[in-house]
Amino acid sequence: MVRLITTRLGAFLLTLFAASVVLFLTINVLPGSAAKSALGMEATPQAIARFEAQRGLDRPLAVQYGQWLFKTLQGDFGVSFQNSVPVGPELMRRVPVTLQLASFAFVIANLVAIPLGMLAAARHGRRADKATTFTATLFGAVPNFWLATLLILVLSLNLRWLPSGGFTPFSVDPVQNLKQILMPALSLGIVSSALLIRIMRASMIETLSSEYIRTAHAKGATEAVVIRRHAFRNSLIPYLNVAAVEFGFLFGSAVVIEDIFRLPGVGSLVLVGIINRDYPVLLAAALTITLFVLVVNLIVDLTVGLLDPRRVKGSRA
């Protein structure tokens, strides 16, 4: 198990380093000028040159990356080009918003996917299976921003059950917070459940066809007992791998949803950074999303190793 953890941590650090390089290079080759975006299109060449020199934008990319990485490792995400305020405090203020949104959406996705996937597998080839497969296909075909617009139209503008946007911290008003986060979470969670339904169904079907399941039936175990005690746990192993990726996707795909519902999260900060060519803001937000995705995958990978001892034995070979 120690070797498994060491191997996974090494891969995590290498992946994070590679991702930071790709992010830095990609953001710095985006069309547009950070100096013109901050100073205005009428800025003189002298003002642009002074702006770039003050912020190190006139140096080679390798040097810029080294300086940025060194400061980032110390917790210094730089200063915004637009308003000259530190990026770190603003980023930390927004992380809980996106984390709450992604967590609520993930819960909704699993509450939909796990029972429907299990039902489809238990009724494989029957009407319930076909209806569930159709539902998953329908959910997967709906863009989350379209679903968000529909929810606002129905639940907010017509029925007036929920607010159309805004954000109130949970510590200030829990009820209002839950009302404001429900529609964004539904927009992400329902669409996300499409893939998870199919994964749960496929995993359960494969598990239910295993030899030990047939042995459990032969010993007189009921269908409910077999599914609950035997099939469900083993079906979760491949499901968790996909769910981890999906959780990261939820955290990273909140950009449009946060903008629609006016949520002050990391996703909306990415959008602000892109529009304003604010490299420190964009880099900090994008790296935070990447780090979150990698950490979640690392945790789930180690958890799967605990659930399936064969993974641990294989890591020691």
Image (cartoon, rainbow, N blue to C red):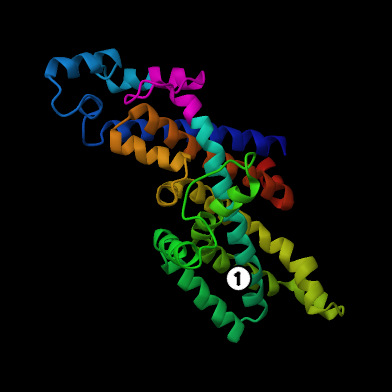
| Place of residue 312 in the rendered image (x, y in percent of width and height, measured from the top left) | 70, 45
Tell me: residue 37, above or below residue 234: above
Q: Using the rendered image of the protein, determine whether residue 241 is visible from the camera's viewpoint.
A: no
User: Is-magenta flag for residue 210?
Assistant: no
Q: Quadrant of the C terminus?
A: top right
Of residues 93 and 180, which is closer to you in this image?
180
Q: Residues within 10 Å of mark 1 (few under 14, many from 20)?
A: many
Of residues 302 and 224, which is closer to you in this image?
224
> Is residue 153 left or right of 133 when viewed as pictured?
left
User: Is-magenta flag for residue 68?
Assistant: yes
Name the residue: 49% across, 33% down: 16
| Place of residue 313 in the rendered image (x, y in percent of width and height, measured from the top left) | 71, 46
Q: Disc 1 marks which residue?
A: 201
Name the residue: 67% across, 63% down: 235
* Outermost residue to the bottom: 127
Q: Quadrant of the N terminus?
A: top right
Instruction: Tell me the SS state at disc 1.
Output: helix
Which region is colored magenta?
67-90
Of residues 249 and 45, which is closer to you in this image?
45
| Place of residue 155 in the rendered image (x, y in percent of width and height, measured from the top left) | 50, 65
| Place of residue 35 in the rendered image (x, y in percent of width and height, measured from the top left) | 23, 24
Name the residue: 46% across, 30% down: 17
Tell me: residue 44, above or below residue 184: above
Of residues 196 and 177, which is closer to you in this image?
177
User: How many numbered circles are shown?
Assistant: 1
Q: Using the rendered image of the protein, determine whether residue 316 is visible from the camera's viewpoint.
A: yes
Tell me the kind of residue under disc 1. Answer: Arg
Name the residue: 60% across, 34% down: 9
